[in-house]
Image (cartoon, helix red, strand yellow):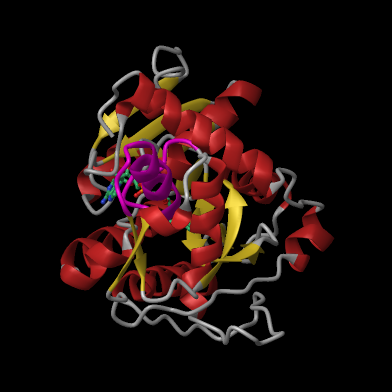
Amino acid sequence: MRILITGGLGFIGSNFINYWMKAHSDMIVNLDKVTYAADYKNVESVSKMSNYTFVRGDIADKNIVNKVAKDVDLIINFAAETHVDNSISNQSPFLRSNIMGTHVLLEAARKYDIRIHHISTDEVYGPTNLNSKKKFDENSRYNPKNPYSATKAAADHLVNSYFNTYGIKSTISNCGNNYGPHQHVEKLIPKTIVNTLKNETVPVYGSGAQARDWIYVGDHCRAIDAIINYGKIGETYIVSGGNELRNIDLIRKIINSLGKDPSSVIKFVKDRPGHDVRYALSSSKITRELGWKPEVPFEIGLELTINYYRNKLDRSVNI
Ligand SMILES: NC(=O)c1ccc[n+]([C@@H]2O[C@H](COP(=O)([O-])OP(=O)(O)OC[C@H]3O[C@@H](n4cnc5c(N)ncnc54)[C@H](O)[C@@H]3O)[C@@H](O)[C@H]2O)c1
């Protein structure tokens, strides 16, 4: 296969490229705009391989997308603006990359009859109560509550509308919070690790009671692999690590495992406006239909992640 991967210098996209190129000899084209969230080092180990090509460009740019897409068999769309805080202060890049960009990719998929897998988030379902027994599944109502999740929801609707209207070969996955190597230090787990290692404080929004469902990025990559190989066209698959943690418990766990006292590291700060209190997901469909389930226990995944950031700091790599 020839695969166009968008956003492949970012966290999940780069993990996916490394994962895929270890197991397959497909031609990979990585189209990335190289925003602040991108890092060429994330794909260092594959960048010299003859079946890997990098193209710097914006998925919202029709000319470049048509040029790189016309010869591929599959598009996997990881490219997006992803930080909720940034979406609250400036929405425009989110609308452009997450909505307009997805539209341009869908048009290319339609024009050249290319299969497309779109990477989305559990945040499109919005929050649920901390004590609720209910978990979101693929039939749950979309209820995005911040500009980031609203743009991701819009993109998902566009994908489904293209399947319904034009019969394009699309699939979507909605995944919980990923953690692992290559994540930008603006995000919760890397920030907690790096700040603690640097003897800086770790900011916690509000009381830290918000709960998230955490999945090791490698397990997410395996889920995408399963969907590409066995997923049914037109379907959505929720991908959950089955590992819900309140932010405050997660942060304390990380600080403890770094040998520090959480009470001297944590600094409670004003909550993010409209902060979703909890996401809760069920991935029973992908387990039942495609045989996928998460494999990396949280303690192991966290150790791998801590080692990754510790090594980066030890090598004085700018993070
Ligand atoms: N990180 C998570 O926990 C998580 C969870 C569920 C879903 N997702 C989704 O997974 C995808 C990847 O997330 P991530 O955490 O790896 O993001 P990231 O911010 O680490 O990386 C995004 C990458 O996309 C590139 N990019 C941004 N806009 C672009 C554009 N217009 N054209 C081309 N490239 C562009 C950036 O340069 C960067 O390399 C996103 O669609 C995100 O919504 C992420």
Q: Position of residue 95 (x, y in %)?
A: 24, 67
Q: On the rendered image, what quadrant is the N terminus found in?
A: top right
Q: Residue at x 83, y 62 (%)?
A: 288
Nearer to us in this view, 285 or 89: 89
Q: On the rendered image, what quadrant is the C terminus found in?
A: top left
Q: Which residues are magenta?
A: 181-201
The tally of labels here is 0
Whether residue 261 can be seen here:
yes
Nearer to us in this view, 183 or 312: 312
Nearer to us in this view, 90 or 34: 90
Whether residue 174 appears in magenta in the rendering, the answer is: no
Whether residue 189 appears in magenta in the rendering, the answer is: yes
Q: Residue at x 77, y 67 (%)?
A: 284
Q: Residue at x 27, y 75 (%)?
A: 270
Please state if 287 lies on the left or on the right of 163 as rendered. Answer: right
Q: Residue 99, relative to residue 55: is it above or below?
A: below
Q: Position of residue 44 (x, y in %)?
A: 39, 19
Q: Residue at x 23, y 72 (%)?
A: 88
Q: Position of residue 22 (x, y in %)?
A: 60, 22
Whether residue 6 can be seen here:
no
Nearer to us in this view, 82 or 119: 82
Q: Position of residue 227 (x, y in %)?
A: 66, 51
Please state if 195 lies on the left or on the right of 247 as rendered. Answer: left
Q: Residue 44, relative to residue 259: is it above or below?
A: above
Q: Residue 194, relative to residue 109: is it above or below?
A: above
Please state if 102 lies on the left or on the right of 56 as rendered. Answer: right
